[in-house]
Amino acid sequence: MDDVITRLDDAAQNGVTAAQLTPSESAPRVGTWLLSWTAVLAGVLAVGLSAYMFYRFAENDTGVIVLLSAFILCFGGGALAYGPLFIMARLMRRAWIYPQKSQALWVLALAGPWVIAGGIMLTFSNILRYAGIVAIGLSLVFCVWALRHIWRYGRKQR
């Protein structure tokens, strides 16, 4: 296993792509790449949902102050979702190129609270039930990736 990690590090430093590695070496890298794009897609979806919610507020209210507060509510609340998603996508992209344990720790710190937030959405709100399921599912996938990444690359840094 240490030989595989050494080859991955050498490959990243020499500009070798994932397609040029053996399947056992490139599979974690391809998974990281796919997961980073999943985070980007989820972030874009969160921005779109924030815009949709603001549009729904703007249909009924025409006052500037009311629209400003609706904008802050929709995009400020949405930033709690799309902010961490875009940051996690960036961290996973960097982990795809230069794998380090610290990137996975940050992803774990950003994704972990969403397991609890998704549970709260499931428990206390019928309207947010599907959002809670998606939040729990995505955050668990990101947490599993982070723990696997810590286990795989954390041993090398000792």
Image (tube, rainbow, N blue to C red):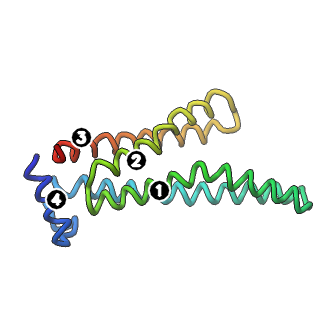
CB contact under 8 Å: marks 3 and 2: no
Q: Residues within 10 Å of mark 2 (few under 14, many from 20)?
A: some
> Which quadrant of the structure image shows residue 150?
top left
> How far is the residue under mark 3 from the one under mark 2?
14 Å
Instruction: Locate residue 59, reporting x and y percent.
Output: 86, 59
Q: Earlier in the sequence, mark 4 or mark 1?
A: 4
Q: Residue at x 87, y 55 (%)?
A: 66
- Secondary structure state at the residue bearing disc 2: helix
Q: What's under tag 2, amino acid-wise?
A: Trp
CB contact under 8 Å: marks 2 and 4: no
- Secondary structure state at the residue bearing disc 1: helix
> Would you say 74 lies left or right of 106 here?
right
> Is the C terminus in the top left, top right, bottom left or bottom right quadrant?
top left
- Secondary structure state at the residue bearing disc 4: helix
Residue designated by label 1: 87
Q: Residues within 10 Å of mark 4 (few under 14, many from 20)?
A: many
